[in-house]
Image (cartoon, rainbow, N blue to C red):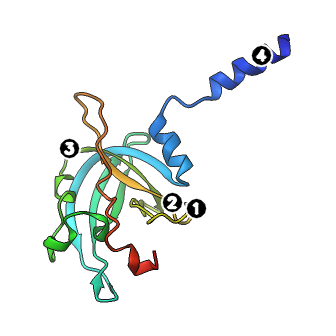
Amino acid sequence: MKLLSILLALAAITVSADPEADACAAAAGTYMTGVVSDGPTFKTGSYRQGVELSHTHVQLINDADNNTYDIAIDNVYADGYDNAGENVPDPLTSLVPGTHIELCGLPFPGGMHWVHSNCGVTPSRSQPDGWVKIIDDSTGNIGSNLEESQEYCYLWGN
């Protein structure tokens, strides 16, 4: 009985206090929070079935290590993609310097990408079900995913 009590106490200690980080781990992604230091900037991209796979980039100062990372955000997953043309689509235009955000995605040396929906495919370490969300520092509330549009999932057979 004493051993069971000790094991239950240890299990309680290992439960994460951050449900967003837990959700990202469950989505097979890497979790990061930080403050936008530069951007957003539009980058042209290649075409797939006549649809431009452009990106929005922001520079992010990571809360955990204070290093700056390049965040590449796929524009086709933003609701405002169709109307943006060769510009940063809404709602990604809100990612201005000083904006506190959280990300779930796939890291690369010096940055992170795949911070978008994976169109219902079972998440994996190489294809997480990621997101970009704004953190309201005054309330601690976390906004909805800015990268959840499913309109162009057909480009990847989904």
Where 157 sits versus 25, above or below? below
Dot 3 or dot 2, earlier in sequence: 3
Q: Earlier in the sequence, mark 3 or mark 1?
A: 3
Q: Which residue is mark 4?
A: 6
Q: CA distance from mark 3 to mark 1?
A: 31 Å
Q: Quadrant of residue 81?
A: bottom left
The residue labelled by disc 3 is: 98
Task: Compare marks 2 and 4 and give the one earlier in the sequence.
Answer: 4
Q: Are marks 1 and 2 in contact (CB under 8 Å)?
A: yes
Quarter of image, res 78: bottom left
Quarter-of-image position of residue 149: bottom left
> In the image, 96: left or right of 131?
left
> What's the amino acid at mark 2?
Pro
- Mark 3 is surrounded, within 10 Å at the Cα level, by few (under 14), some (14 to 19) or many (20 or more) other residues, namely few
Quadrant in which the C terminus is drawn: bottom left
In three-dimensional space, the C-alpha distance between marks 4 and 1, rounded to whole angstroms, equals 34 Å
Q: How many marks?
A: 4
Q: Up-down: is 57 above or below 85?
A: above
Q: Which mark is residue 124?
A: 1
| Residue under the image location 28 percent in, 75 percent down | 54
Q: CA distance from mark 4 to mark 3?
A: 45 Å
Amino acid tagged 4:
Ile
Residue 97 placement (x, y as % from top left): 19, 49
